[in-house]
Amino acid sequence: MDTNELLRGVEAAAREAGRIMREAEDIRASVTAKAGHGNFVTAYDRRVQAYLFEALGALLPEARFIGEEDGADAFTDDDRRGFAFCVDPIDGTTNFLTGFRPSVVSIALLRDGTPWLAAVYNPYADLMLTAVRNGGARCNGAPIRSLDLPLRDSLVLFGTAAYNQELAPRTFALCADYLARCIDLRRTGSAAWDLCQLALGTVGLFFELRLQLWDFAAAGLIAMESGCRLTDLDGKPLTWDGPSSILCASRGVAREDYFPRA
C-alpha cells in the first residue's frame, strides 16, 4: 500500500474512534479500576481499541498490535521486525471519565521496532496531527514546526500519574526547578497531547518520569518531525520497546538549559 494511502486510512480510523468518544454516554457507569491508585479503564477504551485493531488490521493485515487494553500491552521480539501498530485508544482516560479535556486517540505504526507513521486525533477540537518518518509533521494537513524560543520564554508541560506515587517527589522537585527557568508550568493529563503541543509550537518542553510505549510512540514521532529533540531524562535515545522516562525539547530550547538539575 502507498504510504499516503495508508496514512489516510489511519486518519480515517482515528476519526471514527474519535466519534465513538464524542458520542459516549454514561461513561462513569462503564468504569473498571486497574492496578494502582487512580488507574481506570472504561468500556469505551476497550470498544475503541477493538474497533482500531479491526480497522487497522484491514489496512495492513501483516501488522501486529500493541495496545493498552485487553492483554495486548507487551512489546515482544517479534515487534522488532516488520510492522506493528501501537495504539492508545483513549489517552487521558481520567479526563475522558470526568469531562476534563483533552483526551485523544493515538496510533503509531512501528517499522522494525521504530515509529514510522503516526496519527494523534483530538476529537473535541477536531485536530488531526500526523507524521511520517523523515516527512515532517502536519496538523489537519498543514505543516507544523516546534517553538523557536528559549526556555525562559516558554511554557513547560509535565506529566505524572496517581498510580506512580513513588515518582511524585522527584516529579515535583523537577517542577520547582523548571518553574524558576520558564514562564510557567502546565499539566493536561494526556502525554500524547502534551507532546503534540510541542509539535504545534505552543510550549517549549515536556517531561514525565514514566510513560508506556503507547503513550509516546505516535506523538513522539510527530514531535521529532516538527523539529523537537526527544530522549529519556538522562539524555539517552529512546529504545521504543517499553516504558521510559521522556524529555522533549522544542527547537529553541538550548540543550544546556533543559536537562534536569533536580
Image (spheres, helix red, strand yellow):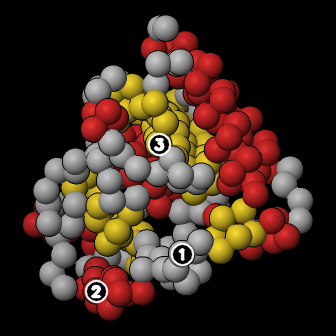
Spatial separation of the CA atoms under disc 2 and disc 3: 29 Å
Please, what secondary structure does the residue beneath circle 2 have?
helix
User: Looking at the image, which residue sits at the far right?
Assistant: 25
Label 1 packing within 10 angstroms: few (<14), some (14-19), many (20+): few
Question: Residue under circle 3?
Answer: 66
Q: Is residue 153 left or right of residue 218?
A: left
Count all numbered tags in the image, as a single digit.
Answer: 3
Residue 116 appears in the rendering: no
Q: Nearer the viewer, mark 2 or mark 3?
A: 3
Q: Nearer the viewer, residue 92 or 229?
A: 92
Question: Residue under circle 1?
Answer: 35
Q: Is residue 91 left or right of residue 145?
A: right
Q: Is residue 67 above or below residue 55?
A: below
Question: Residue under circle 2?
Answer: 170
Residue 210, image quadrant: bottom left
Residue type indicated by callout 2: Arg
Identify the mark nearer the N-term, 2 or 3.
3
Q: Nearer the viewer, residue 151 or 77?
A: 77
Please, what secondary structure does the residue beneath circle 1 have?
loop
Residue 97, image quadrant: bottom right
Q: Is residue 155 left or right of residue 71?
A: left
Residue at position x 59%, y 52% from top?
70
Residue 192 appears in the rendering: yes
Identify the mark nearer the N-term, 1 or 3.
1
Q: Where residue 106 sits: x, y (%)?
A: 54, 45
Residue type indicated by callout 3: Ile
Q: Nearer the viewer, residue 43 or 187?
A: 43
Spatial separation of the CA atoms under disc 1 and disc 2: 22 Å
Q: Where residue 207 sits: x, y (%)?
A: 33, 68
User: Which quadrant holds the C terminus?
Assistant: bottom left
Identify the mark nearer the N-term, 1 or 2.
1
